[in-house]
Amino acid sequence: MSNRLERILQAWHSQKDNCEWVLATIIETKGSAYRKAGAMMLMNDLGQSYGLLSGGCLESDLMRKAKQCLTLNENIQVCYDLQEDSDVAWQLGIGCGGMVHVLLQPVSKENHYLQLDQLYQDLQNRQSAFYLQSLTSDQNQLLTSLGSDLVSGLSEEYFISSVNPAPSLLVFGGGIDAIPLVRISSELGWNTTVVDRRMGYASEKD
């Protein structure tokens, strides 16, 4: 599955009320890390997850932290630091030598799904947005523009991400050489359109 946020939200949206969810977001990195600040994944109480924050090293421990997040019904921050020999990250066998700081937030109807449902609709409509995640509460915000005066006026501390729709790829010609290109584009979560006037190539299967 693509790690693009739009694909992750698509998988979550259809079952958002069927179980309890936690949003995990990298809010800071130092040194070597598989993914950088702004990367997100969603986990639920059934043990399912969508997206990755590492090469697969952190996810099992994050799932345990997500259960704690749901039990407490509050934000949790966790730091994995391979710069320190005594840190739990060494026990997890993480294959990078840096620090990864993760914010976990419970997602529910009561906290308006942390505005993730609206963010998903915006991305579906190919609209960019600024996603503000509160580090201390469940009052996430979604803004279309962000100025320095607005940032200075915020009453809470937020991690701010600029979220953009998936890139669009227009492929002219649906021949054999286009097939692997379109498959790679689809795997990345890009919006892909193939243009070819030949009826024999007008097949989604190929």
Image (cartoon, rainbow, N blue to C red):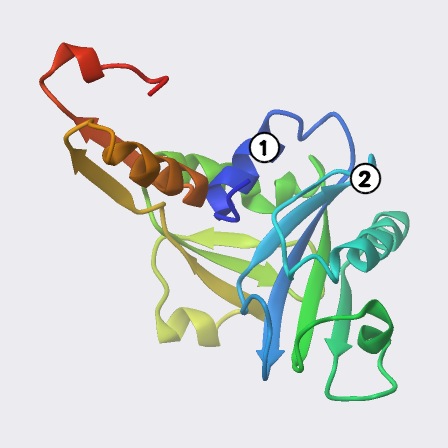
Q: Quadrant of the N terminus?
A: top right
Q: Give me the residue at 30% from left, 32% from top.
A: 179
- Sooner in the amino-acid sequence: mark 1 or mark 2: 1
Of residue 141 and residue 192, the one placed in the foreground of this image is 192
Of residue 44 and residue 158, the one placed in the foreground of this image is 44
Determine whether, in the image, residue 201 is placed left or right of residue 99: left
Give the CA distance from mark 1 to mark 2. 14 Å
Q: Amino acid at mark 2?
A: Gly
Determine whether, in the image, residue 41 is placed left or right of residue 171: right
Q: Quick one: which residue is furthest to the front in this view? A: 176
Q: Give me the residue at 30% from left, 40% from top.
A: 181
Q: Where does the image place residue 97, in percent across and percent down from the top left?
A: 67, 82
Of residue 121 and residue 137, the one placed in the foreground of this image is 121
From the image, tell me which residue sits under label 1: 11
- State whether residue 58 is above or below residue 196: below
Image quadrant assignment for residue 80: bottom right
From the image, tell me which residue sits under label 2: 47
Badge 1 element: helix
- State whether residue 1 is above or below residue 79: above
What is the number of callouts on the image? 2
Q: Where does the image place residue 155, in percent across and percent down from the top left?
A: 58, 69
Of residue 28 and residue 134, the one placed in the foreground of this image is 28
